[in-house]
Image (cartoon, rainbow, N blue to C red):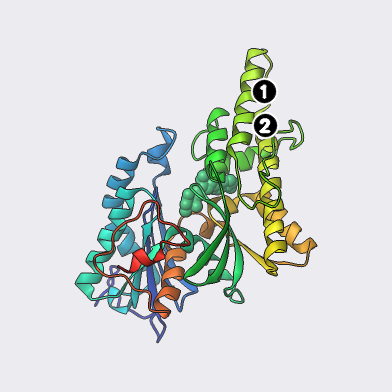
Amino acid sequence: MPSSCGCISNMKNGKHLTMGIESSCDETAIAVLADGREVLSNVISSQIEVHKVYGGVVPEIASRHHLNNIPFVFEHALEEAGVTLDDIDEIGVTAGPGLAGALLMGTAFAKAVCAAADKPLVGVHHIQGHIMANLLEHPDLKPPFLALVVSGGHTHLAEVQGYNEFRILGATRDDAVGEAYDKVARVLGLGYPGGPKIDKIAKEGDPHAIEFKRVYLEQGSLDFSFSGTKTAVINYLHKEEQGGRPVNAADVAASFQEAVVEVIVNKAMMALDLTGYSGLAVAGGVASNSCLRERLQKACEKRGAKFYIPSPIFCTDNGAMIAAAAYHKAREGHFATLHLDVWPGLNLESGLGKLEQ
Ligand code: KG4
Ligand code: ZN
């Protein structure tokens, strides 16, 4: 079968090819992986420009854009990989958690392709995908290991007991860390998405200019809470405004980031101590934050622990991470049926069975 560029497939060469489809939020992304690690293509169509004017993702608009974009992203992913649909051995798709309408676009497309081309379908948990992104660039990493997930919707410390088996050790009790970054960026007038903007502007600020609240919760707890720190920033800005004092946005961004990063690093090190794991794998959009990357790396080095983190392009939402997770799920026989539903609030520890119904 000819590929979209008209050339005959030349890349399969006996390799096992997995396609990964991601559409849980505002990125329409499809990738092709060879043998679970080698990224042959990783096409990402971002909707940032579309949602920017609203200050955040508008679910209905996101779904419509996925619907329009998916066929082109699919063609492009095959073309860039130099393969045809015939060459693909299985197709993985994010079925939760995420925006219901956005998830439906990806799963409906994946099911249609699998039905038409008679391919096995694998349902993937979005956070499982983020964690498995670490396998793309770290051939030595195998479960069990400890994972820190820091994304726009989730903040978890989890034990990765197997490729399809997780135990959550701690989670946020209110805002996810990416959500806190985005809200603080909004009150600072930095725009959407706020995380990368805070990361950038914080480099010019003093991280100790303002001592924002650090929330550790009960002694020994591996849970997180970021809403108190976020509120402390908002209160500070109101107070300065009422007092007619000018605000240094770079100092505020750097001080907020300092408070959040300090707590995350300390909790991750506490989790290493409590579990006895010798290495930490970090995942999710906030894992592309330069300050967090540097601090976690230093903390791991200091205690002789191995440190795994994907390149920034594999930290934010992408299809390669979904394909990586799907490859390992398929090896263990965790396939979905064409009845695969979407699960906007899917639990990583207890919900994976729903993806095989
Ligand atoms: O993992 P992700 O792409 O989507 C979810 O699964 O939620 O994460 C998106 C989040 C957003 O909150 C975004 O602001 C944040 O990751 N983010 C960052 C950076 N890049 C993305 N936060 C801090 N620093 C960054 N460089
Ligand atoms: Zn994500």
User: What percent of the width, then of the height, locates residue 264?
Assistant: 66, 50
User: What percent of the width, then of the height, locates residue 301?
Assistant: 76, 63
Which residue is located at x 45 percent, y 69 percent?
Answer: 325
Residue 149 appears in the figure: no
Residue most toward the right?
A: 302
Q: Height in image: 241 above or below 30? A: above
Cβ atoms at labels 2 and 1 below 8 Å apart: yes
Which residue is located at x 59 percent, y 53 percent?
Answer: 288
Residue most toward the bottom?
A: 14
Q: Height in image: 231 above or below 51? A: above
Residue under pointer 2: 252
Along the viewing direction, whichever of 95 and 139 lies nearer the viewer: 95
User: What percent of the width, then of the height, locates residue 314?
Assistant: 52, 60
Along the viewing direction, whichever of 286 and 127 lies nearer the viewer: 127
Q: Earlier in the sequence, mark 2 or mark 1?
A: 1
- Side of 286 where 293 appears, left or right: right
Residue 58 appears in the figure: yes
Three-letter amino acid code of the residue under disc 2: Val
Residue under pointer 1: 247
**Is the residue marked by circle 2 packed among few (<14), some (14-19), or many (20+) residues within 10 Å?**
many
Along the viewing direction, whichever of 265 and 81 lies nearer the viewer: 265
Q: Height in image: 258 above or below 246? A: below
Q: Quadrant of residue 54?
A: top left
Three-letter amino acid code of the residue under disc 1: Val
Disc 2, SS: helix
Which residue is located at x 70 percent, y 62 percent?
Answer: 274
Along the viewing direction, whichever of 239 and 205 lies nearer the viewer: 239
Q: Quadrant of residue 31?
A: bottom left
The quadrant of the picture occupied by the C terminus is bottom left
Disc 2, ligand 1: is the CB inside 8 Å? Answer: no
Disc 1, SS: loop
The quadrant of the picture occupied by the N terminus is bottom left
